[in-house]
Image: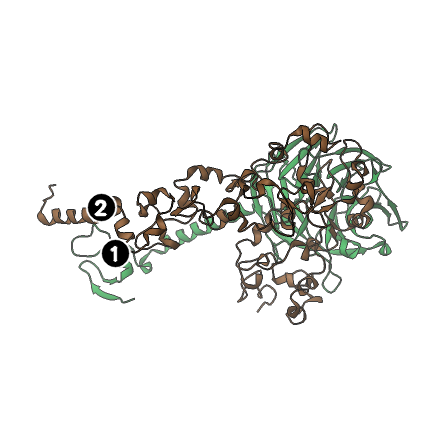
Amino acid sequence: MARHSSTGKDGPVVRKDHHIRDRVHPAAGNGTRRRHRQDPGQRPWAMRMAALAWVALLLLATAAAASPGWQWRLSLRPPAGTRAMRLPAAVFVDQERQRYYVADSGNGRLLSFARDGRFLHAFDAGGGLGTPRGLARLADGRWWVLDKATNQLLQIDIKSRSVRRHTVLRDGRPVLPSRLALHRGRLYLLDNRDGAVLELEQGLEVRCAFTPIGGQGAIDFAIAGSTLYTLDRGRPQVTAFALANGQGRTIPLRHPLALPASLAVAQDGSFLVLDRGAGKVAAFSPTGAFRYQMLGRGQGQGRLWFPAVVRLDPWGNMLIVDEGNGRVELYRR
Amino acid sequence: MRMPISWPHILALAGALLLAAPAAAVPATSGCLACHDRAGFEKRYRHQPVARTLCLACHLPHASRYPGLLLRPEPGLCLTCHQQIASALERRHVHSPIRRQGCTPCHAPHAAPRPALLSDRPGRLCRGCHALADQDGRQHFHPPARGQCLACHDPHAAGDPDLLRQTGDGLCLSCHETGRLRKTHPGSGPEPRGCLSCHDPHASPQASLLRRVVHPPLAEGCDTCHEGDTPVPAATCLACHEEIGDEAGKVHTHLTAPPGSNACVQCHSPHAGDTPTMLRAGLERVCAACHPGIPARYQGQESSHALADATCTDCHEAHGSNRLAMLRADGNAICSQCHETQGTFSHPVGEGVADPRTGQPLTCLTCHDPKGSPFPYQLLADPRRDLCIPCHHY
């Protein structure tokens, strides 16, 4: 672009080019063209700093709105040079021992990690775990492990090195368990056949079934206090059941989800929903109002690839079992 | 302040008025038809703006950013006047030509020998895309399928994915008397249900428009599977299809159903079908019923597998799989079954090559998104830089 210089009546050199000419104020009619924009070199440094501060504030506000406060902390995975996890499917948090246990379903083993993410042990019961897709530790140290290959529950006593297999029956037919949880010493199973959550007696008889209302059945469940929450696999909705009497109410989640896969319930009753299809975690208020979503599909840090489970631990961390990336990611506020 | 009015002002104003007037009021005929053949606009039925020679109602005379010098792209331009259609298009399923191209695939924009400016007879017009009724040796035809497609289908939009005017059996029963049906369907209850489960609504090589493939137990009688009015459980299906039952032991399985339903009939018709697998609809539609976001991911992408003739089950297992995303094989084997060259000559992949970010084996899917992407070759990121940098830190 051609540039010309001239000396104005009331100032130093005024640069004229097409760009600046377009912006000439029409009221400048005394024969002298007044510049609409100051030369950046003449802008006081305080003004520039203020502008920078505003931009920084704006960026911070945007980041906060996108994922309010959740920061990646660490990945649970075996040390480099050892066998990587394959299709991890579940995580169990042992508050008493301050450990994380992960079901490494593709390798047929359970892995333990310290609270600081340090790898501790791997356990495969001599190849007897099959395809572990769920796990929970009883107060007496025995384990319940869900073997998807046989759709059985394994009761493992590590001290006595014994593994006992159980098939849970419901209406005379074997249950197809896909998720497992312990609450106040009682075992809960998600029956993949129809998406009902089963509460089991000590002898593994089905005590009662929580069937989601008006949906496609549950894809995951979470228990908080005296309420059992199920996440519907077809519709964006949560059903909250009172554990005492089985009374349920639906809570629509007011945000589209590609493929909801897992649910975590915070202490304030708000929900974190893992969207396996989108590789995101969406947060909802206790009434289902959308708050924010974060993360996305990919392999890098902070990215998810076919994630399977989201959980909250008692220390305020969010854990995401990332099946495709073979790791469990920890995020902290 | 007084503004002096001088002759130059008056002349300039008059000139401006003269220049502006033709676009607003003068009919465009004299200008447009000097070049555009009048015969094309003089058929029996004429579009209202054409009849009134208001070419500029739809076209710009000099330049436009849209083909045909249109004021706006289709269908938006048409819907400015045809507001009844605009409200119909708010229904869930819109006829795909309208979504993709607008109104002119079916309607002539200027004049046509048929009402509604249809460019051909309704039946023949539909068969231009839906060539089904006279194929594959079908001898028996549903009378409306001989050109009266609009008796059952809404050509613009509907709540039903097949654009049916009514969903369920109500549409069939609006012509077929319940009393007569009860005689031919003993044991079907007070009102026969699920007509399309056994009958092809268009044509069939079999009498009564029965679908091509009939489930063998149906020939032996309803009570082979049914016990009274109770829904048939999946266990009944799996008693014969034992090999499918084994899929319930896979890490990822489709053997799931809403409470009180049968998992098998979510995808398969229990009575009859058009293919040996007796799917309820075309494969992609069956899959998209539960995975609606997947087609959306590859439609309109720069590069997409949908452009090739791949179907879901070319890569994914239908019932169960121990692999991620229910793949039929690992991410390299599944791709190289078609992409043979890349299967033998490519970036190192396989069990011995770990992704430094995750420790997982590198596969084709580490860099490609087979559903589609905005980058060439369905790459996950820009191949000039962003794709490689996450692993190759320089």
**Residue at which label 1 appears:** A35
In the image, residue A306 lies at what x, y percent?
66, 52
In the image, residue A207 lies at what x, y percent?
81, 33
Give the alpha-carbon distance from disc 1 to disc 2, as whole Å: 39 Å
Secondary structure of the residue carrying tag 2 is helix
x 70%, y 63%: residue = B333
* A329 to A244, vertically: above or below: below
Viewer-side label of 1, 2 = 2
Determine crowd level at label 2: few under 14, some 14-19, many 20+ residues with C-alpha closer than 10 A.
few
* A148 to A267, vertically: above or below: below
* A152 to B331, vertically: above or below: above
Kindly identify the amino acid type of the residue bearing the numbered disc 1. Answer: Arg
Secondary structure of the residue carrying tag 1 is loop
Kindly identify the amino acid type of the residue bearing the numbered disc 2. Answer: Ala
Pointer 1 indicates a residue of which chain?
Answer: A
Please give the count of numbered marks on the rendered protein: 2
Visual hue assigned to chain A: green
Mark 1 on the same chain as mark 2: no
**Residue A39: quadrant of the picture:** bottom left
**Residue at which label 2 appears:** B21
Chain letter matching colour brown: B
